[in-house]
Amino acid sequence: AKEEEPGVREEDGEEDNTAPEMLEEGEAASTKGAHQHALEIEERLVAALEQTRAESRQEVEQVTDVLKERLAVLEQSRAESKEEAEQVTDKLAVLEQATVASKERLAGLEQAKTESQKEVDALKERLS
């Protein structure tokens, strides 16, 4: 009984390549499995990235909506404040006009008082 070694010729004259062929097939299967595993990991990473992007977009849209709402409130408040400021300015102008008119009236009354006092003094002098 002769022991057979890989690569040794058998009695029929053919070389025994069973072991190297099996080794190559095993390496090919291992490489194919590793490649398949890498593809699966890549697919999961791509899916996770797409999910993260979608969530990020949604968060950005939500923040944008909140900021737009806040901006609208601020613009409304600013418009109301501007309107109130214009009303206060108008009232102040009216009050200034009324003050000027009151001062003019007071000056007129003081002038009339002075003239009346002169008349009273003149009448007193005539009566004495």
Image (cartoon, rainbow, N blue to C red):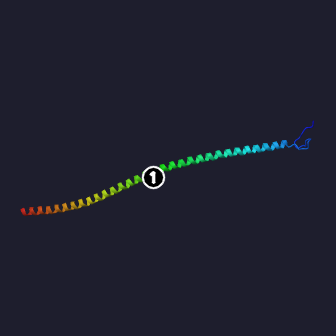
The quadrant of the image that shows the N terminus is: top right
Instruction: Identify the residue at horizontal 57%, vertical 47% (top origin).
Output: 54
x and y percentages locating residue 12 in the rendered image: 91, 42
Instruction: Identify the residue at horizontal 43%, vertical 52% (top origin).
Output: 74
Look at the image and tell me whether residue 128 can be seen: no
Vertical relation: 36 (above or below) 103:
above
x and y percentages locating residue 4 in the rendered image: 90, 39
Mark 1: which amino acid?
A: Leu
**Horizontal side of residue 99 vs 55, given as left or right:** left
Figure disc tally: 1
**Horizontal side of residue 48 vs 69, given as left or right:** right
Look at the image and tell me whether residue 112 can be seen: yes
Q: 64 or 89, which lies in front?
A: 64
Instruction: Identify the residue at horizontal 37%, vertical 56% (top origin).
Output: 82
Badge 1: how crowded within 10 Å, few (<14), some, or many (20+)?
A: few
**Horizontal side of residue 69 vs 106, given as left or right:** right
Outermost residue on the front side: it is 12
Q: 9 or 35, which lies in front?
A: 9
x and y percentages locating residue 84 in the rendered image: 35, 54
Residue that mark 1 sits on: 71
The quadrant of the image that shows the C terminus is: bottom left
**Horizontal side of residue 106 vs 52, given as left or right:** left
